[in-house]
Image (cartoon, grey):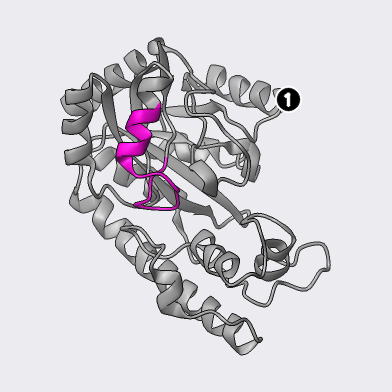
Amino acid sequence: MKVELHCHTTISDGSCSFEEVLELAAKERISHLAITNHDTTYGLLEMVDKGNKAGIEIIPGIEVSGYDFARGRRVHLLGYYVDYGHKALLELCQPLIEQRHAASEEMVKRLIYSGYEITWSQVCKYKGGSGVYKQHIMLALMEAGYTDSIFGDLYKRLFSRGQNGEEPGIAFLPMEYVDASLAVKAIREAGGVPVLAHPGQYDSYEIIPDLIKAGLEGIEVLHPHHSRAEEQIAIQYAEKYNLIMTGGSDFHGEYGDKPARLGSKSPGIECVDALKLKKQSTIKL
């Protein structure tokens, strides 16, 4: 049996509903499935119940969009076995959700002003429970015939950050993410086990000592965006700070920027056992 510890549904920016993900998990012989939607625990209670009925243990999770302000880098934090709807996570993440939704609406206005024939209502029909993401805007553009893919040349042209001297895309808007250390603390306050997500993707290794002080318990080693070299760096940090080594496919279905098969980055049942042990120690604290 396999373990999947990083998965998104239509509630955030995945293309599959929870029911579709659950069906895929059964086909892939996944015994433990963590749902880690961006900045929300919406729907987790029902998902746990449906998972139990299907014979698959659902691990209630979250992926918080954090930031390393000292180094100017994005830092994502995964939380496992969180108490759904906990005040600490709601207070931290609700402003993020509202800001993302408002930014997406402004992006659409910019596109319309630039001549793209789409509407906000057209984009909103694709959104999930935590607002509109760039993938949803791209779906509207695909529907209007401007492109045949989400993550292609048009996506880069519209939403690029403008690094290395290049001009930013016409619809690029910077997000004000939360302090990564505060995200770790909120996950712990919500009874969860905080894990640094895909550090190789955002080169977020340097903040690890600060996150350890805040209560970090794990690091994602296995991830589709990680090279062997990046996996080794993550392992070295895990060994140095005694962190749980996790892994996951970061499944987004058709909305992923890289093809990923559910369960393809399984860290093994031993990883789940280690997370459960940390969860118990958190409760005792």
Give the percent coordinates (x, y) of residue 101. 41, 70
**Residue 178 sits inside the magenta stretch:** no
- Is 247 located above or below residue 128 in the figure? above
Q: Can you see residue 281?
A: yes
Q: Nearer the viewer, residue 98 or 117?
A: 117
Give the percent coordinates (x, y) of residue 238. 54, 21
Give the percent coordinates (x, y) of residue 228. 71, 23
Q: Which residues are magenta?
A: 8-24
Q: Can you see residue 83?
A: no
Which secondary structure lies at badge 1?
helix
Q: Nearer the viewer, residue 269 or 230?
A: 269
Query: Which quadrant of the structure image shows residue 63?
Result: top left
**Amino acid on which the number 1 mark rests in the picture:** Ala
Give the percent coordinates (x, y) of residue 269. 38, 12
Quickly name the residue at label 1: 229
Query: Which quadrant of the structure image shows residue 233?
Result: top right
Q: Nearer the viewer, residue 61 or 76?
A: 61
- Is 173 located above or below residue 66 in the figure? below
Q: Residue at x 73, y 68 (%)?
A: 157
- Is 243 located above or below residue 213 in the figure? above
User: How many marks are shown on the rendered structure?
Assistant: 1
